[in-house]
Image (spheres, rainbow, N blue to C red):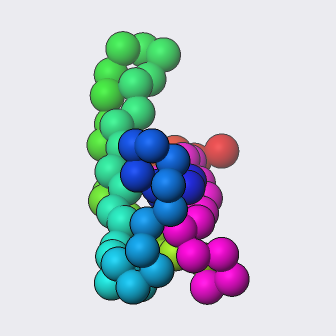
């Protein structure tokens, strides 16, 4: 995920360093049910300010056994 202003100009570096990103998600199942994934705090890349990365293991998050 990349963060910028609506006109694609970069955010101020000091503002970026003070910010945090929280991700929440809802999964819609084929059966029509819905499951919510816990809100996760995502850290910004130390090498690339303004770049956030998150990997989600849906099986683990939803408690699904393989």
Q: Tell me if 6 is positioned left or right of 50 in this view.
A: left
From the viewer's side, name the closer residue of 55 and 15. Answer: 15
Q: Which one is in front, 35 or 15?
A: 15
- Residue 16 point in image, percent of width and height: 41, 76
State the residue at coordinates (50%, 62%).
10
Asked if the stretch drawn in magenta spans residue 13, the answer is no
The answer to which image quadrant residue 51 occupies is bottom right
Stretch of the chain drawn in magenta: 46-61
Q: Nearer the viewer, residue 62 or 50?
A: 50
**46 versus 53 height, above or below:** below
Foreground residue among 3 and 21: 3
Specify the quadrant that holds the C terminus.
top right
> Does the image show residue 63?
no
**Looking at the magenta stretch, what is its main secondary structure?**
loop
Give x and y (percent) for residue 48.
65, 75
Q: Is residue 15 left or right of residue 61?
A: left
Tell me if residue 55 is in the magenta stretch: yes
Q: Residue at 30%, 43% (x, y): give it.
A: 36
Residue at 61 percent across and 85 percent down: it is 46
In this rendering, the answer to whether 8 lies above or below 48 is above
Position of residue 7 relative to residue 1, above or below, is: above
């Amino acid at each position: 995920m990349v963060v910028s202003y609506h006109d694609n100009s970069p955010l101020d570096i000091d503002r970026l360093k003070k910010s945090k990103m929280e991700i929440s998600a809802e999964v819609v199942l084929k059966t029509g049910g819905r499951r919510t994934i816990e809100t996760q705090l995502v850290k910004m890349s130390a090498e690339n300010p303004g770049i956030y990365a998150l990997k989600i293991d849906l099986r683990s998050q939803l408690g699904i056994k393989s």
